[in-house]
Image (cartoon, rainbow, N blue to C red):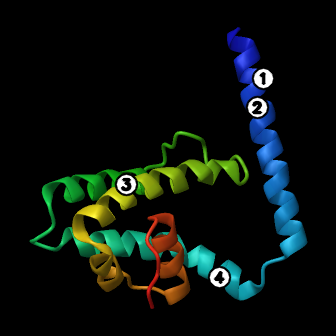
Amino acid sequence: MLVDALIAIVISLTVVWLVIALVLVVKRPDRETIAAVAKLPGELVSMIRTLLREDQLPRAARIRLWILLGYLISPIDLVPDFIPVIGYADDVIVTAILLRGTARSVGADALREAWPGSSDNLKAILRLCGISDRS
């Protein structure tokens, strides 16, 4: 039973990886898009650090942000990052869950004010948080 479940998980992850790889081959993102995506983790960590410096940050949001910061910096992941594409999926999921809760606590404007990077990456983060971008 356990072996069957593990085989199903491996097959599912392989199929997802192949679909994502196919999309990347078909879409062929330009260098600017690739550069923006490469900057996103650093911008996210910078935003978290800025929010953590706020004195008025609610305790629950502060705890979520410390957990997120620790998770993003930690070399230990739920799914190892050396697995192509899927290795980073857990980072995105954990980030989305914790940032959505934080955004509900502090508001979208606080995220916008703390964001240090490009507006395109901010839009991606707001979408990840389930916030419509009004700018």
Q: Nearer the viewer, mark 3 or mark 1?
A: 3
User: For the point 61% across and 51% down, which residue is it?
Assistant: 89
Q: Dot 2 corresponds to which residue? A: 10
Q: Dot 3 corresponds to which residue? A: 98
**Residue 82 or 112: which is nearer the viewer?**
112
Q: Nearer the viewer, mark 3 or mark 2?
A: 3
Separation of residues labelled 4 and 2 (CA atoms):
30 Å
**Residue 1 or 31: which is nearer the viewer?**
1
Numbered mark located on residue 35 in the image: 4
In the structure shown, which secondary structural element does the residue marked by tag 1 occupy? helix
User: For the point 76% across and 25% down, which residue is it?
Assistant: 8
Q: Dot 1 corresponds to which residue? A: 7
User: For the point 46% across and 57% down, which residue is it?
Assistant: 96
For the residues bearing labels 3 and 1, Cβ distance under 8 angstroms: no
84 left or right of 131 in image: right
Q: Earlier in the sequence, mark 3 or mark 1?
A: 1
Separation of residues labelled 3 and 1 (CA atoms):
30 Å
In the structure shown, which secondary structural element does the residue marked by tag 3 occupy? helix
Q: Residue furthest bottom?
A: 135
**Residue 133 or 79: which is nearer the viewer?**
133
Q: Earlier in the sequence, mark 3 or mark 2?
A: 2
Q: Amino acid at mark 1?
A: Ile
* Quadrant (top left, top right, bottom left, bottom right) of the C terminus: bottom left
Separation of residues labelled 1 and 4 (CA atoms):
36 Å
